[in-house]
Amino acid sequence: MRAFLAINLPKEVQDYLEDLIFKIDKENQRVNIKWVEPENLHLTLGFIENIKEAALNKIKTDLESISVPENLILTLERPGSFPNKEKPRVIKIKILDPEKKLKKIHEAVKDIFQKNGLEVDNRPFLPHITLGRIKTASAKLRYQVETEALSFTVKSIELIKSDLTPAGPIYSILKKFPPDF
C-alpha cells in the first residue's frame, strides 16, 4: 500500500489554485504538463511506499503523539519549479511558514518514520504544494500570472492512502491527526 501524511487544503485555497493552474496552463500551452486535480492538492509531510497494513497501524498510533498547534497559519507564495527553472520537472507553490511550526511537525513525522524502519527523504524540507508534473524534458516555463499571498489555517493533518489508476491517483483518508482536531 502507498500512503502519505499531508495537510489537505480548504476549499477556497483549492479554488484559488485551480484558477492559478488554469492561468499557468494558458501561458504554457506547448509544454506537456500533467496537472494535479484541485481536490487532490495537498502539502505532503511524509511519503510511505509499499507498507503492510500491520505496520501502517503501528505508525497511525505513533503519529497520534504529534503536537499540531491550533493556530498553524500557512501562506501561499508565488509559483516555481523543481529542481530549478532551467530543467523543471515539477510546478509548485511554495508555502511560507515564518514561525517554522511546519518544519517541527515534519521533523516529528520523519522521526516516527525512522523509528518504524521506513525510508525517509533527507533532503531539506521545502514546504510546497505540487500543482503539476512536466512530461517534456526540456520545457521552458512562464509564470507571468498575478498571485496573492493567500493564507489559511491548518484544520487537520491526515494519513492518506494513494491508489494509482490510469486516470490518476485516488486518495482515501485513513486517519486525521491529532484525533481531537
Image (tube, rainbow, N blue to C red):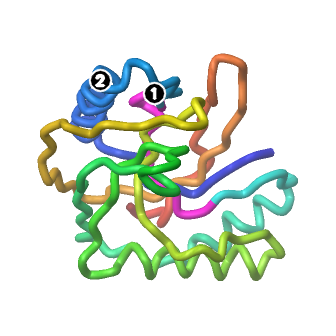
- Circle nearer the viewer, 1 or 2: 2
Residue 22, label in figure = 2
The location of residue 4, given as percent across then percent down, is: 63, 53
Observer-nearest residue: 20 or 157? 20
Label pair 1/2, CB-CB below 8 angstroms: no
Q: Residue at x 71, y 73 (%)?
A: 113
Mark 1 vs mark 2, CA separation in Å? 11 Å
Magenta segment = 36-46
Magenta-span inclusion, residue 40 = yes
- Classify 10 Å Cα crowding around label 2: few (below 14), some (14-19), many (20 and above): few
Q: For the N terminus, which image quadrant?
A: top right
- Numbered disc 2: secondary structure: helix
Residue 49 in the image: above or below residue 164? below
Observer-nearest residue: 109 or 58? 109
The answer to whether 144 appears left or right of 114 in the picture is: left
Magenta-span inclusion, residue 157 = no
The location of residue 84, given as percent across then percent down, is: 46, 56
Residue 53 in the image: above or below residue 55? above
Quadrant of res 51: bottom right
The answer to whether 143 appears left or right of 45 in the picture is: left
Mark positioned earlier in the residue sequence (1 or 2): 2
The answer to whether 109 appears left or right of 39 in the picture is: right
Q: Residue at x 42, y 64 (%)?
A: 127
**Could you tell me the amino acid type at mark 2?**
Phe
- Classify 10 Å Cα crowding around label 1: few (below 14), some (14-19), many (20 and above): some
Quadrant of res 62: bottom right
Q: For the C terminus, which image quadrant?
A: bottom left
- Numbered disc 1: secondary structure: loop
- Location of mark 1 (residue): 37
The location of residue 146, given as percent across then percent down, is: 13, 39
